[in-house]
Image (tube, rainbow, N blue to C red):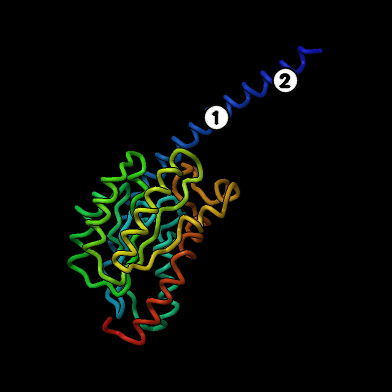
Amino acid sequence: MIVLPIAAGAVVVVGGALYARHLVRRQDHWRIALSEKIPVHSAYWREQNRGTGELRYVAIGDSAAQGIGASRPSHSYVGLIAAHLRGKLGDRPLRVSNFSVSGATLRTALDVELPKLAKSTPDILTVSIGANDMATFEAVRFESELRELFAALPDHAIVADLPSFYFLPAERKVRVANLILRRLAAERGFTVVDLHSRTNRQGAWGVVTQFAGDLFHPNDRGYRIWASAFLPAIDERVDLLEKFPRI
């Protein structure tokens, strides 16, 4: 009478181990596949930056701003914001300068992205950076580098907090980082996009349906969630520019 439950339990354990190995292999496959997309996305955004426009939208960020995990670069949250802006602008041209770097940390943003920003004059600026810092998170270093970054941004910067990582211990680090981010953003008076709340409320359904195969980068559905978090602040900025073009 006891043998059957034990055998069934053994089957479950073995099945779980096999499924776990399957997930690891699947993630490895997708990591390689998505890494091969990095040059494609970079080339797309370089081409976008060559245009001219009445308004200039600049993005600072990491692989999420590049759109890794999306079916195409234009389906990233930056691409979706750009499409939304073009809809609002009508016939007026928009120039998109995506200075983000795949794999970027705060230090990358300071060393690589800020020099490009210093040479531009963005009408709209979105900043979403810091997720890659969670792997080696140190609160003191994070605050120091974030403070340095914020000091170099224009007053109208739209800053996103870090998205939900859903599971501990990474989620605990994210929550500490977001407390720091919101405090520093308040000191500068930046508009903060509540990306963490918007992604966290997706719950288990979001984990299953809104991530690419590497289970780290958003897919097209996930990027639509990200873009929806930014759009109210984007619209507010555009309305202000239409009333006061020189701000």
Say which quarter of the image contains residue 137: top left
Q: Quadrant of the C terminus?
A: bottom left
* Comes first in the chain, label 2 or label 1: 2
Residue 30 position, x and y percent, is 45, 40
Residue 212 position, x and y percent, is 49, 47
Q: Name the secondary structure under disc 1.
A: helix
Residue 124 position, x and y percent, is 32, 72
Crowdedness near tag 1: few (<14), some (14–19) or many (≥20) residues, C-alpha within 10 Å? few
Q: Look at mark 2 in the image and give the residue it sits on.
A: 8
Q: Is residue 37 above or below residue 239?
A: above
Amino acid marked by disc 1: Ala
Q: Name the secondary structure under disc 2.
A: helix
Residue toward you, 241 or 67:
241
> For the residues marked 2 and 1, what is the alpha-carbon distance in whole angstroms?
18 Å
Seen at 75% across and 18% down, the residue is: 5
Q: Look at mark 1 in the image and give the residue it sits on.
A: 20
**Do labels 2 and 1 touch, CB within 8 Å?**
no
Q: How many marks?
A: 2
Seen at 82% across and 12% down, the residue is: 1
Residue 140 position, x and y percent, is 27, 45
Seen at 56% across and 51% down, the residue is: 206
Amino acid marked by disc 2: Ala
